[in-house]
Image (tube, rainbow, N blue to C red):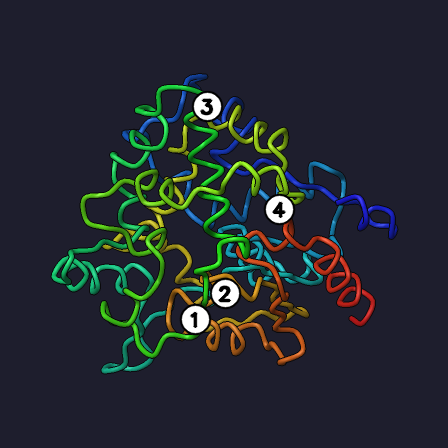
């Protein structure tokens, strides 16, 4: 944020719906979000509307760019797709933005949504030896927040889990060797690490803690010092993970009721200049076969605006902030 501000921009990074301080103002209850609460507020249309509301609350009628990482990539993408008059450019990071779900084009045509993809691979992954499960399906169960929050007994245990989770998804974890996958089949996607394709009976902490960094690796980590990680630990300990997990539940809803309002934008493409930035060691770029190519079509991305940053994993803006800032500033200046 600071280098972009020093370049002359106002930079705003909100706690999004269900995260951090937002959880104390967007609900009638002040306690942790529970699994039984209404999912409708966490629909992607609402998440994008939150950002529109924020722009107006800050007193602006348009912004130079909306930038989103991971699930925020989808939020930023929909902001630009729906309100090109308000968001003049878009930078999506680490998770390809593939546009709105679409009605079938013609009587016999069909298009596979994310929810349909996950539903199709559910049984196939379970049939593998050993049986596996997709992390999005796990995150959509009531057990996930119990495993990662309720049943984690101490602050130190939560810190250890999050440290391991950040580590295995970064370029610091040597086994990360992402590449395009040939097909959206259980056998093809099962090559991904266990933080994506989990053991059937394993929790997320059980999936990542065996690969936790050594004390010397933690001490040498300049992109996420323990005192900065402690801020995340403190907030998640206070709020739990259910607010964020509700985003997954909406996107993986196999009834497809929750994302149905986005069908209004079937076939619509991003009209403003777009850029994609990710770490070259990030499996998130390739986890859904065909998504990167679809993003290029939806966002009109040329090859020079599909950036894979060397030496970075999933947390590209933390691992290589200088490179990310340079790419964003060059994009702003050239458009």
Q: Residue at x 68, y 57 (%)?
A: 87
For residue 96, which numbered disc appears in the image? 2
Quadrant into which the N terminus falls: top right
Task: Tell me the residue that label 1 is attached to.
Answer: 291
Nearer the viewer's eye, disc 3 or disc 4? 3
**What label does residue 52 carry, if any?**
4
Estimate the x, y position of residue 95 in percent, counting from the top left.
50, 60
Looking at the image, is mark 3 or mark 1 nearer the viewer?
A: 3
Residue under label 3 = 156
Query: For the residues carrying marks 2 and 4, which lies nearer the camera in this image?
Result: 2
Between discs 4 and 1, the one toward the N terminus:
4
The Cα atoms of the two marked residues, 3 and 1, are separated by: 37 Å
Rendered location of residue 55, percent (x, y): 69, 43
Q: Is residue 25 above or below residue 143?
A: above
Q: How far apart are the two marked residues, 3 and 4, measured between alpha carbons?
A: 38 Å
Q: Earlier in the sequence, mark 2 or mark 3?
A: 2
**Do residues under tags 1 and 2 come within 8 Å of each other at their CB atoms?**
yes
Name the secondary structure under disc 3: helix
Q: Residue at x 50, y 33 (%)?
A: 19
Q: Which of marks 3 and 4 is nearer the N terminus?
A: 4
Of mark 3 and mark 1, the one earlier in the sequence is 3
Q: Distance between the residues labelled 1 and 2?
A: 6 Å
């Amino acid at each position: 944020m600071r280098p972009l501000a020093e370049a002359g921009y106002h930079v705003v990074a909100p706690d999004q719906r269900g995260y951090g301080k937002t959880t104390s103002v967007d609900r009638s209850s002040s306690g942790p979000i529970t699994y039984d609460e209404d999912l409708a507020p966490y629909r992607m249309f609402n998440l994008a509307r939150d950002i529109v509301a924020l722009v107006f609350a800050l007193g602006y009628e348009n912004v130079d760019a909306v930038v989103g990482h991971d699930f925020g990539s989808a939020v930023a993408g929909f902001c630009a797709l729906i309100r090109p008059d308000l968001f003049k450019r878009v930078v999506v990071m680490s998770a390809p933005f593939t546009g709105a779900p679409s009605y079938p084009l013609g009587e016999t045509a069909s298009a596979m949504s994310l929810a349909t993809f996950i539903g199709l691979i559910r049984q196939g992954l379970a049939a593998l030896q050993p049986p596996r499960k997709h992390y999005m399906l796990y995150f959509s169960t009531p057990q996930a927040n119990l495993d990662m929050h309720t049943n984690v007994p101490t602050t130190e245990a939560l810190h250890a889990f999050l440290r391991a989770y950040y580590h295995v998804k970064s370029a610091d974890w040597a086994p990360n060797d992402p590449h395009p996958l040939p097909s959206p089949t259980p056998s093809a996607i099962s090559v991904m690490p266990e933080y994506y394709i989990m053991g059937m009976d394993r929790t997320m902490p059980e999936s990542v803690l065996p690969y936790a960094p050594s004390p010397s690796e933690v001490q040498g980590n300049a992109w996420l010092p323990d005192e900065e990680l402690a801020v995340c630990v403190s907030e998640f300990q206070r709020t739990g993970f259910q607010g964020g997990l509700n985003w997954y539940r909406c996107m993986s809803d196999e009834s497809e009721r929750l994302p149905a309002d986005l069908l209004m934008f079937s076939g619509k493409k991003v009209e403003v200049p777009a850029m994609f930035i990710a770490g070259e060691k990030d499996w998130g770029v390739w986890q859904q076969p065909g998504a990167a190519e679809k993003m290029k079509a939806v966002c009109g991305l040329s090859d020079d605006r599909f950036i894979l940053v060397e030496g970075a994993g999933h947390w590209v803006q933390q691992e290589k902030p200088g490179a990310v800032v340079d790419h964003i500033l060059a994009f702003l200046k050239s458009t």
